[in-house]
Amino acid sequence: MDFKNLLNRIYAEIKSSKWEDGNLPDYIPELKHINPDKFGMSLITLDGKNYGVGDFQEKFSLQSIAKVFAFTLVYKDLGGKVFERVGVEPSGNPFNSLIQLEQERGFPRNPLINAGALVVCDMIIENFDTPEKTLFDFIRKIARNSSIDYNSSVYQSEKNAGHRNRAMIHLMKSFGTIKNDTDKVLDLYFKLCSLEMNTEELSQTFLLYANEGKIYGSDERILTKSQTKRTNAIMQTCGFYDEAGEFTFRVGLPGKSGVGGGIAAVHPGKYAVATWSPLLNKKGNSVAGMKALELLTTKSGWSVF
Ligand code: GLN
C-alpha cells in the first residue's frame, strides 16, 4: 500500500474543504484558544514505516483518547475483575450524560465514557501506592517516550470548569460505585485528560493495540492477545459515544476520539493512525478527523470489516 501518496491525497482534500459545521469545545476554556485550522495525520505500520502530513508534530490535548491508556493499565493489572466495576456496552448517549447513570444505579456502561473513566481512575487509586506516577510512567512506557506529560494549564482549566464531572462522581459516590475521595479521583482524571501528544507519538502508542498487546519496538507484552481483542472491541463499540455506529459505518476501524480534536485508530496486524483537527461536531468528535479516516479506509480498501 502506498501510504505516502494516500496521506498526501487525504491532506490535500481536507485542506481544500471548508469545515463550517464544527466548533471548539467551549466548556474547557483553555481549549477555546486553539487555532481551528490545524490538521495533522500520522500513520505507522507494523513493518516499521512512518508517515506524517500537516501539523503531525504539534502537540494537542488527548482528552478522552487517554481513557484507553488508563483502562489498559487496570485491565493489565486486574484482568477480568475490571468488569465487576464497569460494563462493556455502548451507551448511545453523550460522553458526559448523567441520565443513564442514575437509571443504572451508578454503574457505568463502559470505560470510555466519562463515568467509566472516573471509575477506572478510582481503581488506579485503589490498586497502586503512587497512582499518578504509576499511570504516567505506564503511558511513557507504552509510548516509548519518557517526555510524555500532561499540560498543566489544560488541567487547571478542566479542574476549574469540570462541573458535570463533579456531578457525575458525586452521583456515583451516592450509589457506592466510587470507593475513594472524589477530589482525589477527579484530580487524576483531569490530569489524564490533559495528556499531550502529537499525532506521531499517538500513533506510535496505539501500535500496542495493532500489535496484539505488545509494545511496538520492544515486543514487551502489556495485554494478552485476548485482552487486546477485547480492548479493540470496546473502542469499536464505545469509542465515539453516541456516534460509535457512524464511525464504524464510515471508517470501519476500532478507535477513540477526544474533545481536543484528536482521533486514534488501529487496523490490527497492520497499522495505527492518528489525526488532529480541533473543530468538533455536535457529538464531540473531530469533523475533519472523521473525514480523513473515512478517506483512508475508503481509498485503501482496507478496514476490519
Ligand atoms: N476531559 C473531557 C471531559 O471530561 C473529556 C471529554 C472528551 O474528550 N470526550 O469532559
Image (spheres, helix red, strand yellow):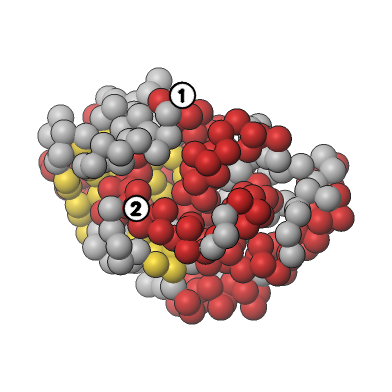
Left or right: 188, with 86 as reference point: left
Name which residue type carries label 2. Lys
Q: Quadrant of residue 150?
A: bottom left
> Looking at the image, which residue sits at the far front?
129
Left or right: 195, with 238 as reference point: left
Mark 2 CB within 8 Å of ligand 1: no
For mark 2, give the secondary structure: helix
Name which residue type carries label 1. Ser
Expressed as whole percent of the image width and height from the top left, the position of residue 51 reads: 17, 47
> In percent of the image, x 29 and y 27: which residue is there?
269
Tell me: residue 45, above or below residue 125.
above
Q: Quadrant of residue 237?
A: top right
For mark 1, give the secondary structure: helix
Mark 2 / mark 1, whichever is N-terminal = 2
**Distance CA(mark 2)–CA(mark 1):** 21 Å
Tell me: residue 140, above or below residue 294.
below
Left or right: 110, with 170 as reference point: left
Frontmost residue, 187 versus 259: 187
- Residue 46's mark? none
Q: Which residue is mark 2?
A: 141
Q: Which residue is mark 1?
A: 226
Q: How would you rate the neighbour count of disc 1 (Cα within 10 Å): few for under 14, some for 14-19, many for 20 or more?
A: few
Q: Quadrant of residue 34?
A: bottom left
Expressed as whole percent of the image width and height from the top left, the position of residue 89 reads: 65, 32
Tell me: residue 6, above or below residue 196.
above
Frontmost residue, 140 versus 250: 140
